[in-house]
Image (cartoon, rainbow, N blue to C red):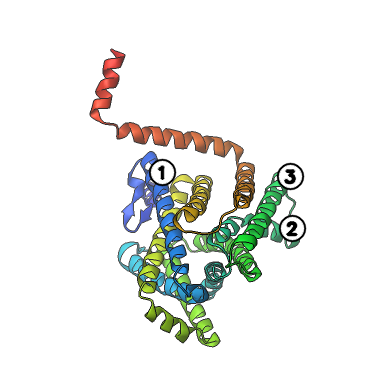
Amino acid sequence: MAMRHNSQKSVNLVCGVDFSRYSKHFQFMSLASSVLGLFIVYGYIQEKLIHIPGFRSHGWYLSFIQFVFVSFISYLDSTFISRSPKRRELPPYYEFMILSWMTVGTIGLSTVALGFLNFPTQVIFKSCKLIPVMIGGIIILGKKYTLYDYCSVFLMCFGLIGFSLADQTVSPEFEPKGIVLICMALCFDAVFGNYQEKLLKKYPHFTNADIIFYTYSFGSLIIFTWLIATGQFLTSVRYASQHRDVYPLAMIYSTVGYLGVQFVLALIKSSGVLITTIVTTMRKVLTVVLSFIFFTKPFTFQYVWSGSLVFFGICISIWKRNRIGILNAVSSVIRSVQAFMSSHSSPVSKIDKTVLQV
């Protein structure tokens, strides 16, 4: 029985594919590259959508499409692919409603903020979740933090101020309202992760697809109610019907986002939170760089030094959490890359090595 329990515990499913059957090196290379690739595409499509003329005022409708489509995909995944045989009881709906409100606040507000901010500015702000977490810890829990934490937050704050001032100077889309919205989204996000982890531990018989299905289904109702109450729904429907690119791009955007979340959860399970944090941080850096490459926008060197301050602040935060773990993680990544490259090296190169040794 113990052996069976361990084998079940080691399963790491992503859309029906069990990555735990493969070596740790292959798991890291495949999962990390998938996370990078999927979320870079996710960011590209999101920015492509907001560049459609007039789309910036329809952020809530994009979030509504995303929530509905992700609910549908997660239902198919939960029912036909990742369904757990132990799932017998109904979910605690009130707890999922709380998680849904947090999800709507995190995703919806950050999407709406794009109507008032440059895309790289939004990404930079989303990278600074530590700030509201630390402020909440001091005010609510009375926590004490180390010098590393204060240095990290100090660098992030100055980087965000610099990035915002640069955006205000060169970007015609900038409005202070966008800063308020993205800061509100950060606060929701800071609570969201901890609450989601609590639910996953409290109800282990629910799969990731189950959690996403109930969360996004309730979230769809919340956003739909908001759109109807504010009179935005019919206006957005008419707008989307006049621009044929909206629905196809929104569906691809939602699908890629759903797959990205699944691969992130699988990477956490396979390689741990630390390595996953490093991978997702690099993804955000690449997203900002590629945004300036693929989409024409005003540029100033102030973006570079401000973004660097935020990046170094994040690095200090990661280093403070686990210095030894980072060194082990780096060496593990190097070994994984070396093992992956050697396993895929050509027979000719192996013959050449043998000849050289002779």
> Is residue 155 in sight in this rendering?
yes
Pointer 3 or 1: first along the chain: 1
Question: Residue 84: horizontal and vertical position, in percent?
Answer: 36, 63
To which quarter of the image does residue 186 belong? bottom right
| Quadrant for the C terminus in the image | top left
Tell me which amino acid carries mark 2: Ile
On screen, residue 333 versus residue 22, left or right, reads right
Question: Residue 347: horizontal and vertical position, in percent?
Answer: 23, 28
Q: Nearer the viewer, mark 2 or mark 3?
A: 3
C-alpha separation, residue under disc 3 versus residue under disc 1: 32 Å
Identify residue for label 1.
Answer: 28
Tell me which amino acid carries mark 3: Leu
**Mark carried by residue 251:** none
C-alpha separation, residue under disc 2 versus residue under disc 3: 14 Å
Tell me which amino acid carries mark 1: Phe
Which residue sits at x=50%, y=61%?
Answer: 200
Question: Residue 62: horizontal and vertical position, in percent?
Answer: 46, 73
Kindly state the secondary structure of the residue where label 3 is placed.
helix
| Pick the front one: 345 or 198 | 345
Asked whether the beta carbons under mark 2 and mark 1 sit within 8 Å of each other, the answer is no
Q: Residues within 10 Å of mark 2 (few under 14, many from 20)?
A: few
Pointer 2 or 1: first along the chain: 1
On screen, residue 135 versus residue 314, left or right, reads right
Outermost top residue? 358
Kindly state the secondary structure of the residue where label 2 is placed.
helix
Question: Residue 281: horizontal and vertical position, in percent?
Answer: 53, 49
To which quarter of the image does residue 183 belong? bottom right
Identify residue for label 3.
Answer: 147
| Pick the front one: 163 or 35 | 163
Identify residue for label 2.
Answer: 138
C-alpha separation, residue under disc 2 versus residue under disc 1: 36 Å
Pointer 2 or 3: first along the chain: 2
